[in-house]
Amino acid sequence: MAKESMKARERKRERMVVKDAAKRAALVTILKSSSTDEAIVAQKWDAMMAIQKLPANGAKIRLHNRCGLTGRPRGYMRQFGLSRVTFREMALAGKIPGIKKSSW
């Protein structure tokens, strides 16, 4: 099990990403414009400075997938939202519908 502080930190990052998403998207569209006009270049510079002033944990790249039950950061299965260890335990116990141990 992951420490509660790690799980809480990840939840905080998720909230920050949602909160800053619209502002970041607007600034990124300004930065990605291909115009070379001097007014646009100055606007791009201001947008770049504004992005740098936003909190780093508000960036989507900072998020890390974690198991929904244990908080394990490695071996994450996106389809189920669980780590491989938790997935195997639940599948063997019959707690995941449609999943059973294969044998041939």
Image (spheres, grey):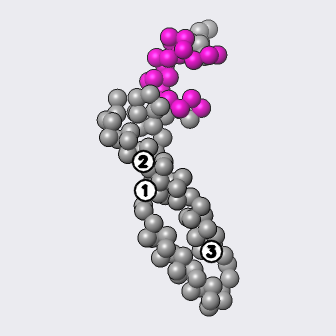
Q: Where does label 1 land, which residue?
A: 57
Dot 1 crowding, Cα within 10 Å, few <14, some 14–19, many 20+? some
At x 58% / y 82%, what residue is drawn? 43
Label located before the other in sequence (1 or 2): 2
Image marks 3 and 2: residues in contact by CB distance under 8 Å:
no
Amino acid type of the residue tagged 2 in the rendering: Lys
At x 67% / y 78%, what residue is drawn? 34
- Magenta residues span 79-98
Amino acid type of the residue tagged 1 in the rendering: Asn
Q: Where does label 2 land, which residue?
A: 12
Residue 50 at x, y = what percent?
A: 49, 73
Assign a secondary structure to mark 3: helix
Horizontal arrangement in the rendering, residue 40 relative to residue 4 (left or right): right
State whether residue 12 appears in this view: yes
Amino acid type of the residue tagged 3 in the rendering: Ile
Label located before the other in sequence (3 or 1): 3
Assign a secondary structure to mark 2: helix
Image marks 1 and 2: residues in contact by CB distance under 8 Å:
yes
State whether residue 60 appears in this view: no
Which labelled disc corresponds to residue 30?
A: 3
Q: Quadrant of the C terminus?
A: top right
Horizontal arrangement in the rendering, residue 11 relative to residue 21 (left or right): left
Which residue is at the far bottom? 38
